[in-house]
Amino acid sequence: MTEALEKNIRKVVPYVPGEQPQNPDVIKLNTNENPYSPAPGVARVLKSMDADLLRLYPDPTNGCLVKALADYYELAEDQVFVGIGSDDVLSMSFLTFFNSGKPILFPNVTYSFYDVWADLYRIPYVTCALDDQMMIKKEDYFKENGGIVIPNPNAPTGVYEPLETFEEILQKNTDVVVIVDEAYVDFADGPSARTLIEKYPNLLVVQTFSKSRSMAGMRIGYAMGNKELIKALNDVKYSFNSYTMSRVALLCGVEAVNDKAYFEEHVKKICETREKTKKALAALGFSFPDSQSNFIFAAHKSMPAKEIFAALKARNIFVRYFNKPGIDNYLRITIGTDEQMQALEAALREILLQA
């Protein structure tokens, strides 16, 4: 490659996703996937899909899924935007709303895609430190900025912030868009910021089918907000690609949304397993912030996280380790089935005894 050519190539440090092992015997607790199958209606769609329809483009408006989500959340259809996973929705939101030239704000310990998108789109940003309880300091978000994005619950900490905190941030930032990234909110005891949409026209709430609805492999995400924000997102989407969602994804998404009983049953099951796992980890000498998500962010009192990570991996148990300042002694452990978590606990007990 010539030097002149290389100068014309955009250079970014890419996001590094969690490892996807090919060994079927691995207990996979590293990417916050749901251990249970999607709603039964999803399987019915896949089995009954007419392959001949795949020669036709899908609905560019994603109408059937937009309607299902609007009905489920009691919103108007023009308050809902659908994209290819919440990463697509968030990336589109950065491109659409963060154009003032002023730095956007987000936590310093958070979803590690935010700084990637900011760099990709040439958006200046400032990160705001968490307090010693791994909660945001709301006053840090009261200064002049070009927009705000905060996950709730936060990732990788799992900490849930009360809606009162977001109300104060919204009230202090009426001229910029505030994005609340709620990938994990269905596992939290507290409510979604969705309830604030009518009150704050600058609020955009982003959610996903990947976690609580067991559909990470289908790539469905969505945003909810004021109709002007949703129109702006659609305008940018149509400038990239009119047909973002496949026919299969749209139909499967509708089935997942419509089976509320199945959804609630399996979210409850994961939360119950999470609470049991918290007690087991604490008994083994781990400490962690109070997770309101489908994972636990844990540090051991004496054994370094990097060593535990390697020892678990040698036993075919994958968890997530972040080699980053401030969190390099923590493991993020996805909540699996009861049986998977019991296997994890047994492995940890063995590892700690041998240390």
Image (cartoon, rainbow, N blue to C red):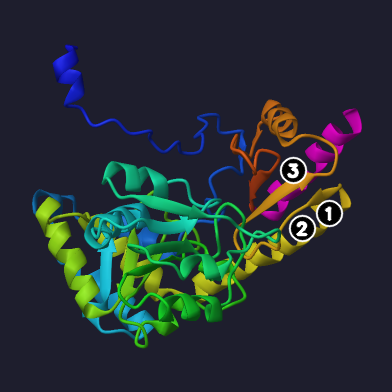
Mark 3 Cα shell of 10 Å, populated few (<14), some (14-19), many (≥20): many
Horizontal and vertical percent for residue 83? 27, 59
- Residue under circle 3? 344
Q: Which mark is residue 282?
A: 1
**103 sits to left or right of 350:** left
The quarter of the picture where residue 346 lies is top right
User: Which one is in front, 200 or 187?
Assistant: 200
Per the image, label 3 sits on a secondary structure element best described as helix
Q: Which mark is residue 278?
A: 2
- Cβ–Cβ below 8 Å for labels 1 and 2? yes
Q: Specify start and end residues of the magenta stretch as a single range.
A: 337-355
Per the image, label 2 sits on a secondary structure element best described as helix
Residue located 44% across and 53% down the image: 126
Q: Is residue 300 visible?
A: yes
48 above or below 318? below
**261 sits to left or right of 239:** right
- Screen quadrant of the N terminus: top left
Which SS type dominates the magenta stretch? helix
User: As shown in the figure, which amino acid type bears the numbered disc 2?
Assistant: Lys
The quarter of the picture where residue 300 lies is top right
222 above or below 227? above
Marks 1 and 3, the one that precedes in the sequence = 1
User: As shown in the figure, which amino acid type bears the numbered disc 1?
Assistant: Ala
